[in-house]
Amino acid sequence: MLFLCYLIIATMSFWYLLILNKHFRKIKVVTTEPSKEAKFYQQAPGPLPWPILGNLHLLASQKPTAELFTDLSKKFGNIYSLTLGATKCIVINNLELIKEVLNQNGKFFGGRPNFMRYHQLFGGDRNNSLALCDWSILQKKRRNLARRHCSPRDTSPYFSKMSNVGCSETKILIEKLKESNNNSKHIPIKSFVQRACANMFFQYMCSVRFEYNDYDFCEVVDFFDEIFWEINQGYAVDFLPWLALFYKNHMSKLIHWSSTIRRFILNRIINKRNELNSSQPQEDFTDALLNSLTEDKNVSRDTIMFMLEDFIGGHSAVGNLVMLTLIYLVKHPNVANKIQLEADSVSGKEQRIISFYDIDSMPFTMATILEVLRCSSSPIVPHVATEDTVICGYGVAKDTIVFINNHNLNHNKFYWKKPNCFQPERFLEYSIEKTDMNPNEVKKTKSQFWQIKKNMPYFLPFSIGKRTCIGQNLVRGFGFILVANILRQFNVYYENVNNIEINMGCIALPAKPIPIVLVKRNKNI
């Protein structure tokens, strides 16, 4: 027994020495310029790691990870090291360094973490995913293929299609909510919103929509919501792979979710389409994907299926953003009232559905959505160094995980007045460019000339650089349509507003019913 104790102590000591050596060693960086020699750089400072666990014990705090990262920056600076398990990490905490990592040195940080969970979600290989794969030529091709569909200009037919799809599905959603509201005070609002969002993406990308009582469709929407929550969480097994045995059931659940989604997309969409000839017109994103099969030998049918799954899964981000916005509006009814005033003014006597083209006429509504994004500080997916490099004079070894602390950026007093307060007005600026009125007349009609601020380089909800979220226009546009039209028809309440807790470091909400109550507005609209 005594020998066993000595053996355990010796093993732990050996592990600790290895970690300390890795923690304090200098990084040798080989320059690409032949005239310059390789240099050694000290690693960024950080807390001393424990044996085996590294600094994982710090993440066991009750604080959200983003807030913990901000607290550590006050002690170790705007760039510091963490050792999670045996994995070397750095945390970036200010705008200048974020730009240095994602813009100036983006080519060195195009990788993604090699977490076991990521592989399980995408058929055993995370490189099947656009968001979780390492940067590659294939990744660049996939993004170029998707860009015209997912980030259309407001003058393009794709933008018009997005607006029409969003409006038609929102109209159906409102009717469903009214119908359920008549039958019961408590309705599964999140389920309805997520189904509406899923149909928006399916209609826009695949020209197909599903009924809200379609069992397979509802199951897939629920699984997408579970996966969105899953990706935004962290687990010990991500950094201690030898714990996989204890996560066997969890991994099986991930495989079940993803395989069910894949089977649905294959059976209900892809198998019902014929491969297009390049001369045939492309009606939607699915047509463009199928057409790429004949144009690029590196694109397989599996590539198409995973791309479609990835982009359609983006609807979960929209649904969670809408639900999070409704929660904030419950806590801030004065903000909800202002949105309703804008919505009433825009929809007019004809009481039409509010569309994409009304965004400029409802700046306060869009400002509210942006403020929700700022407050939630949804974490940017971690990057990984693909080779030894240097950031801010510190050496960064290949395979180091880079965490971008968006929370510190979005709650920094240097950029935001009263950053802990919910104030959509911070995203608005006053403009008189649209009028020839004299100053006295402008003052009388001041509210007509508010617009979203254009120059806010310190606000990065969708990241920056070559891995910027390609679907951000879909998220903002569909999110705007849903929030504006729901508030035009309903007041939102929560039975016990004092019990509402909001995670300030994540846009994802648990995949469970949220007890928000919708009450039809007294105004006949």
Image: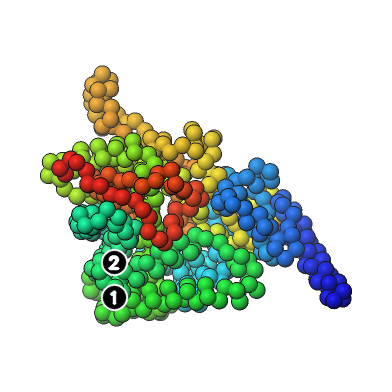
- Spatial separation of the CA atoms under disc 2 and disc 1: 9 Å
Q: Nearer the viewer, residue 354 or 216?
A: 216
Q: Amino acid at mark 1?
A: Ile
Quarter holding the C terminus is top left
Q: Earlier in the sequence, mark 2 or mark 1?
A: 2
Give the x, y percent position of residue 278: 28, 75
Determine which of the numbered discs, if any, sits on residue 202 in the image: 2
Is 161 above or below relative to 123?
above
Residue farthest toward the top in the current orientation of the protein: 440
Residue at figure coordinates x 55%, y 44% from the top left: 408
Q: Can see residue 286?
A: no
Give the x, y percent position of residue 279: 24, 74
* Left or right for 279, reference 326: left
Q: Nearer the viewer, residue 106 or 202?
A: 202
Q: Amino acid at mark 2?
A: Phe
Q: Secondary structure at mark 2?
A: helix
Colouring convention used in this rendered image of the protein: rainbow
Q: Secondary structure at mark 1?
A: loop
Residues at marks 2 and 1 touching, judged by CB atoms closer than 8 Å: yes
Is 307 above or below relative to 83?
below
* Left or right for 504, reference 168: right
Q: Can see residue 124?
A: yes
Residue at figure coordinates x 54%, y 35% from the top left: 414
Residue of label 1: 269
Numbered label tally: 2
Residue at figure coordinates x 19%, y 41% from the top left: 522
Give the x, y percent position of residue 99: 54, 48
Quarter holding the N terminus is bottom right
